[in-house]
Amino acid sequence: MRAAYYEQLDRVNDDLVEMTRLVGSAMNRATQALLDADLPLAEAVIDFDAKVDTLASDVEERCYELVALQQPVATDLRVIIGALRIASSLERMGDLAEHVAKQARMRFPKVAVPQELRATFAEMGALAEAIVSKTGSVIATKDVALCADIAQHDEQMDRLHRELFTIVLSPSWKYGVEEAIDVTLLSRFYERYADHAVSVSRRVVTIVTGEPYVAVSLEDQAGR
Amino acid sequence: MRAAYYEQLDRVNDDLVEMTRLVGSAMNRATQALLDADLPLAEAVIDFDAKVDTLASDVEERCYELVALQQPVATDLRVIIGALRIASSLERMGDLAEHVAKQARMRFPKVAVPQELRATFAEMGALAEAIVSKTGSVIATKDVALCADIAQHDEQMDRLHRELFTIVLSPSWKYGVEEAIDVTLLSRFYERYADHAVSVSRRVVTIVTGEPYVAVSLEDQAGR
């Protein structure tokens, strides 16, 4: 009975790792759709989000079942509640990838990102990919040492987000208001995506160490 | 023993209602600081957020204690997990009020909102107030009928958010890129604030009815 319980708990953990893979792939393809103004790819990312949502609900339901059937002790319960919160952060990361894809679709056949900012968004996409893949490793291996890398990627993301404001607001910005709003919102989607990944990795630390969770407010450092 | 348990659970619920009051007051004052370019008021809202964060952590810790000490049955556990999630949405609403106040501070002594959009933001502030106060009532009374009102306020918020894009992107927009970005981000803070309130009210429905939670994706309807 107890063995079956831990087996189910492991399955929940595997599904959380799978969710990082899904939302990583979603953001990766969303970035590509954005930079290439690739409409079918953007549509695919938008449709794909239902898969993430379904897995999140599935994990949530199985967590409730685990609790109902097994009356876990306090430590196990911290794990289950942690899993619920991780699932909801990952679901939100999927939404943010979808937002990026929707922005690509809205501007099609135009590219939503001006030439000067392509490199910035390509870098944001690469950072998002690195951060989510390490987040998956933290969940899978409980190697909390990786959290330092994740925090560093997140700082780099915040730096890019701040730089983007400088570019958009400089007198040499030769595009209009619409382009400025587009890139500001897009940049915020990447920055929030990274914040959620940091939040997930901190939840894992909480579970592993039993220390209280420290809320993510790194985005505030970016000034907006 | 059991009576003490329910007493503590009631106290958690009271604290969630108190949190709605705090984040309602924060957004209300943030809106005022924004429209009046009132720096001391903006600073007060920013400092005030620590109070919300403390109450959220406090609720969280007490939920864990309740579970650890009392080994609640499945139904109670749904209530406790629901309370944890409600606390984290409310904490996030506090952050969004703080973001509005920071925007007011950043532009001081200028008013961050152009004259033409004052009425829009005043209305957004009033909607935020109505929505959070009804959310508090839903938590306090479990009267899920109020959720229809909350959904309606949220739709109205989405409509204002969409209209704002139309105004900012119209050829008659006589302000610059900075003002456009400011009001777009501000508008998004209000719209997310309302989304979180909807999410809280749906969590209460889940607790009361036992039906699965429906994720909030209303913001998507706003197109950004």
Image: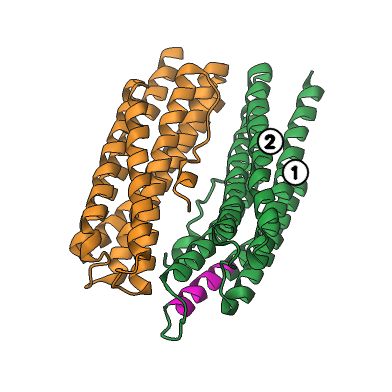
Chain colours: A orange, B green
Q: Nearer the viewer, residue B142 or B200?
A: B200
Residue A88 x %, y %: 46, 41
Kind of element beneath mark 1: helix
Pointer 2 with pointer 1, Cβ within 8 A: yes
> For mark 2, does the 10 Å Cα neighbourhood hold few (<14), some (14 to 19), or many (20 or more) residues?
some
Residue assigned mark 1: B18
Residue assigned mark 2: B55
Look at the image and say whether residue B160 sits in the magenta stretch: yes
Q: Which residues are magenta?
A: B157-168
Residue A35 x %, y %: 21, 60
- For residue B3, the mark is none
Q: Nearer the viewer, residue B68 or A221?
A: A221
The first of marks 2 and 1 along the sequence is 1
- Which residue ends up furthest to the bottom in the rendered image? B172
Residue located 33% across and 58% down the image: A100
Residue A97 x %, y %: 33, 52
Identity, as a three-letter code, of the amino acid under mark 2 = Leu
